[in-house]
Image (spheres, rainbow, N blue to C red):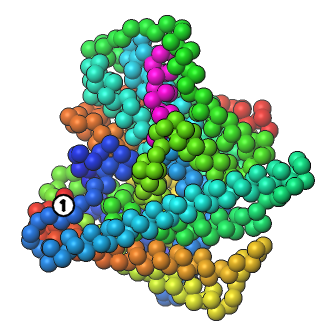
C-alpha cells in the first residue's frame, strides 16, 4: 500500500496526503497551490456529506421514537417518508465522499507487481490510473447530469412525500462534477511526481 | 465471439489493469462499460443505464446500512471502547502463553460486535495492543499476525457490512445472516486463540509471559465493557425483536456509539470531524467498488455468464459439497490477489444461482444463509492471505520496524486455523444454521 510513515496511526493512514514538493514538472508551484484549493474543497464536501449522514441517522431515530410513541401511547408518529429522505440523502453523501477518496488515493489497488517497481515507475502507473479515473468520473458525471435533466423534464417525485426526484440528482451532481475536477488534478499531481522524484 | 468468450477476455484485461495498479473498482467499471458496448454493438445501452446506475446504486435503502456501520466503527474506535475491551480480555487471558496476543484477538472479537468492518477493527486494536506487545517483547511476526487475523473478526462477528452486501446481492434476510454468523465468529476467535497458544508454546521466546490477574481485577475490567454489550444487544436484538428495520438499527447503533464515545470523553469536536473524514474515505472507496462491480455484473449478465456457468456445473453432476469446496478454493486463490469486497461483489451474482440449483438436503433459505457465511469467511481469509491482504498492509504500516515478510510469516498459522474452520463449517452446515433454526 502507499503508506507514508508518520501518518499511520489512523485507518486511512495508508492513503497519504501527498502534495508535490518537487520543483520539477509541469508548473509545480501552481500545481501545489491548486492542489491545496482542490484538496480543501474535497475535504469540505466530504465533511458536509458526513454531517448529512449524521443528520439522516438522527432523522431515522426521531422516526423510530415517533413510531414507538404512536404505537404505545397513541401520540406522535413516524416521520412520513423517512426512508425516501434517507435514500436521497445517502446517495448525495456518497457522491460527496468520492472526490475526497480520490484525492487521498483511497481506492484499493493490487500491489503485486508494483512492490518491486521504483517510485518513478509507480508515479507513471498512478498517472495512467488517474487518467482512466478522469474518464470514468466524466462518464458518471455526464450521465448523471443527463439523468438530472430527464428528472427535471418529467417532474418525477418520490412516492410518499412527493419530493422532486431531481433534487437528489442535483445534490449528487455536486459530488460527481467535483470528482471530475479532483481526478483531473490528480493526473497533474502524478505527472509532476513522475517528472520529479517519483511517487511520494 | 460469443458472450462468454468476451467475458473471459474482459477478465484478462481486468487482471492486467489491476496488475498495473489501476484501482480495482475502476478496472471493473471500465471492463463493464467497454464489454457491454462491444457486446451490444453500440454505446446506447451503456449511456442510458449510466443515467441512473450510479444514483440508484448509492441510494439503495438496504445499502444505507453500510455508511452507518462504518460511522459506528469510527465512533467506537474513539470512545475508549477498544482500550476497555483489551484490558478485560487481558485480565482473563494475559497469563497464558501468548496472552497479550490472545487478548488482542479476544478484544477484536468484542470490537467486532460494535464495528461492521475488518479494517477499522484491525487498525483500532493495533493502536491499543501493539504498544503493549512491544513493551513485553513480543516478536513482530506474532503481534502483527494475531492483530491482522483478529481484525477479520470485525467483519465476521455481526454486525457486518459484508453480510449486508451479500444480503442485497442474494436477496436474503439480514438478521438471519447476522445470527448465522455468531457461531462461526466465535469459532474463529477460539481458533485464533488456540493457534496463538500453540505457537507460543512451540516458540516461547516469541511471547514472554506476564502475571496472572486476580478475580477482583477481572470483574472490574469486565464492567468497563458494558457499552459493547449494550450496542450489540440494541443493534442485533433490535432487528430480531422487530423494534427496527436493519437501516434503523444501524442509525441507532451509530448514534448510540457516538453518544457513548462523547460521554466517555473520547469524542470531542475535533475527533468527531476526524471520524467523519475517515468515514468519507472508506465509504467512498467501498461504494466505488460497489458501482464498479455493478457495471461489470451488468455486462456479465448480458453475456449470459451466470447461466452458462450454472449449466456447465450442473451437467457435471458432482457432489454439491465438492462444488462449494471448489468455489471456496477459488475464493482462496482470488483472495490472495484481489480485495475481498470486489471479490464478493463480482462472484456472488455468478455463484449464487449455481449453488441454489444444487441439493444439499436443506431448504433454499438455509442453503442461502449457509453459503453466505461461507462466502464471508472466504472473503475474510482473503484479507489476511499474502501478498494482497488489506489487514496485513494496515497492521504492517502501523508497526514500525516489522518488515512485511515477517508479517506474512506471522499470519500463516492463522490461515491454517481458518482452513480448518472452513472445513468444519463446510462439512457441518448445522454449525451455521443451527442458531437460526433455534431462534426463528
Vertical arrangement, residue B303 with respect to residue B412, above or below: below
User: Where are the magenta residues, as a range?
Assistant: B77-92
Q: Residue at x 56, y 63 (%)?
A: A52
Locate residue B388, reporting x and y percent: 34, 47
- Nearer to the camera, A19 or B392: A19
Q: Chain of mark 1?
A: A
Occupied quadrant, residue B210: top left
Vertical arrangement, residue B40 with respect to residue B157, above or below: below
**Is residue B80 part of the magenta span, yes or no?**
yes
Q: Residue at x 40, y 76 (%)?
A: A178
Vertical arrangement, residue A122 with respect to residue A191, above or below: above
* B238 horizontally vs A125: left or right: right
Mark 1 neighbour class, 10 Å CA radius: few under 14, some 14 to 19, many 20 or more: many
Locate residue B361, reporting x and y percent: 74, 40
**Is residue B175 part of the magenta span, yes or no?**
no
Residue B289 in sight in this render: no
Locate residue B146, reporting x and y percent: 39, 29
* B367 horizontally vs A130: left or right: right
* B215 horizontally vs B334: left or right: right
Locate residue A137, reporting x and y percent: 41, 76
Magenta region's main secondary structure? helix
**Residue closest to the far right:** A74
Q: Residue at x 36, y 45 (%)?
A: A10
Secondary structure beneath dot 1 equals loop
Residue A181 in sight in this render: yes
Q: Residue at x 31, y 50 (%)?
A: A14
- Nearer to the camera, A74 or A101: A74
Instruction: List the residue tagged with mark 1.
Output: A199
* B341 horizontally vs B353: left or right: left
Amino acid at each position: 500500500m502507499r503508506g507514508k510513515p508518520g501518518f499511520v496511526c489512523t485507518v486511512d493512514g495508508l492513503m497519504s496526503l501527498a502534495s508535490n514538493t518537487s520543483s520539477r514538472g509541469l508548473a509545480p508551484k501552481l500545481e501545489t497551490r491548486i492542489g491545496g484549493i482542490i484538496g480543501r474543497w474535497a475535504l469540505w464536501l466530504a465533511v458536509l456529506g458526513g454531517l448529512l449522514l449524521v443528520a439522516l441517522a438522527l432523522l431515522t431515530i426521531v422516526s423510530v421514537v415517533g413510531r414507538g410513541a404512536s404505537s404505545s401511547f397513541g401520540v406522535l408518529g413516524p416521520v412520513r417518508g423517512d426512508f425516501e429522505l434517507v435514500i436521497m440523502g445517502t446517495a448525495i453523501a456518497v457522491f460527496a465522499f468520492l472526490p475526497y477518496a480520490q484525492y487521498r488515493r483511497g481506492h484499493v489497488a493490487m500491489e503485486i507487481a508494483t512492490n518491486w517497481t521504483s517510485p518513478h515507475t509507480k508515479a507513471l502507473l498512478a498517472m495512467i490510473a488517474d487518467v482512466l479515473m478522469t474518464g470514468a468520473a466524466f462518464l458518471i458525471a455526464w450521465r448523471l447530469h443527463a439523468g438530472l435533466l430527464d428528472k427535471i423534464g418529467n417532474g418525477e417525485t418520490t412516492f410518499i412525500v412527493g419530493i422532486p426526484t431531481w433534487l437528489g440528482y442535483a445534490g449528487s451532481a455536486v459530488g460527481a462534477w467535483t470528482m471530475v475536477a479532483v481526478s483531473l488534478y490528480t493526473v497533474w499531481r502524478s505527472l509532476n511526481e513522475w517528472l520529479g522524484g517519483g511517487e511520494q | 465471439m460469443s458472450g462468454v468468450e468476451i467475458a473471459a477476455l474482459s477478465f484478462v484485461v481486468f487482471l492486467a489493469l489491476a496488475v498495473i495498479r489501476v484501482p480495482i473498482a475502476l478496472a471493473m467499471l471500465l471492463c463493464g462499460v467497454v464489454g457491454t458496448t462491444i457486446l451490444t454493438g453500440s454505446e446506447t445501452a451503456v449511456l442510458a443505464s449510466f443515467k441512473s446506475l450510479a444514483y440508484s446504486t448509492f441510494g439503495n435503502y438496504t445499502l444505507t446500512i453500510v455508511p452507518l456501520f462504518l460511522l459506528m466503527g469510527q465512533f467506537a474506535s474513539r470512545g475508549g471502547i477498544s482500550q476497555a475491551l483489551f484490558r478485560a480480555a487481558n485480565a482473563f487471558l494475559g497469563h497464558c502463553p501468548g496472552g497479550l496476543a490472545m487478548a488482542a484477538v479476544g478484544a477484536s472479537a468484542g470490537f467486532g460486535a460494535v464495528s461492521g468492518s475488518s479494517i477499522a477493527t484491525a487498525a483500532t486494536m493495533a493502536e491499543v495492543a501493539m504498544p503493549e506487545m512491544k513493551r513485553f517483547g513480543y516478536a513482530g511476526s506474532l503481534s502483527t499476525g494475531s492483530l491482522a487475523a483478529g481484525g477479520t473478526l470485525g467483519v465476521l462477528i455481526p454486525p457486518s457490512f459484508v453480510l449486508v452486501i451479500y444480503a442485497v446481492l442474494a436477496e436474503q434476510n439480514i438478521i438471519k445472516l447476522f445470527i448465522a454468523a455468531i457461531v462461526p465468529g466465535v469459532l474463529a476467535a477460539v481458533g485464533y486463540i488456540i493457534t496463538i497458544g500453540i505457537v507460543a508454546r512451540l516458540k516461547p521466546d516469541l511471547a514472554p509471559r506476564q502475571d496472572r490477574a486476580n478475580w477482583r481485577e477481572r470483574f472490574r475490567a469486565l464492567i468497563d465493557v458494558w457499552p459493547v454489550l449494550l450496542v450489540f444487544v440494541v443493534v442485533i436484538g433490535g432487528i430480531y425483536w422487530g423494534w427496527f428495520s436493519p437501516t434503523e438499527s444501524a442509525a441507532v447503533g451509530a448514534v448510540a456509539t457516538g453518544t457513548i464515545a462523547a460521554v466517555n470523553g473520547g469524542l470531542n469536536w475535533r475527533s468527531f470531524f476526524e471520524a467523519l473524514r475517515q468515514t468519507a474515505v472508506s465509504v467512498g472507496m467501498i461504494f466505488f467498488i460497489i458501482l464498479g462491480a455493478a457495471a461489470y455484473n451488468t455486462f456479465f449478465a448480458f453475456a449470459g455468464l451466470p447461466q452458462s456457468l450454472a449449466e456447465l456445473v450442473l451437467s457435471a453432476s458432482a457432489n454439491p459439497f465438492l462444488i462449494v469446496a471448489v468455489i471456496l478454493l477459488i475464493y482462496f486463490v482470488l483472495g490472495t490477489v484481489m480485495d475481498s469486497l470486489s471479490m464478493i461483489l463480482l462472484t456472488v451474482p455468478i455463484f449464487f444461482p449455481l449453488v441454489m440449483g444444487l441439493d444439499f438436503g436443506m431448504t433454499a433459505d438455509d442453503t442461502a444463509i449457509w453459503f453466505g457465511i461461507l462466502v464471508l469467511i472466504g472473503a475474510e481469509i482473503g484479507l489476511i492471505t499474502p501478498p494482497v491482504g488489506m489487514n496485513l498492509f494496515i497492521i504492517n504500516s502501523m508497526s514500525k520496524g516489522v518488515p512485511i515478510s515477517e508479517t506474512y510469516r506471522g499470519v500463516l498459522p492463522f490461515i491454517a486455523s481458518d482452513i480448518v474452520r472452513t472445513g468444519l463449517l463446510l462439512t457441518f452446515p448445522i454449525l451455521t444454521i443451527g442458531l437460526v433454526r433455534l431462534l426463528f
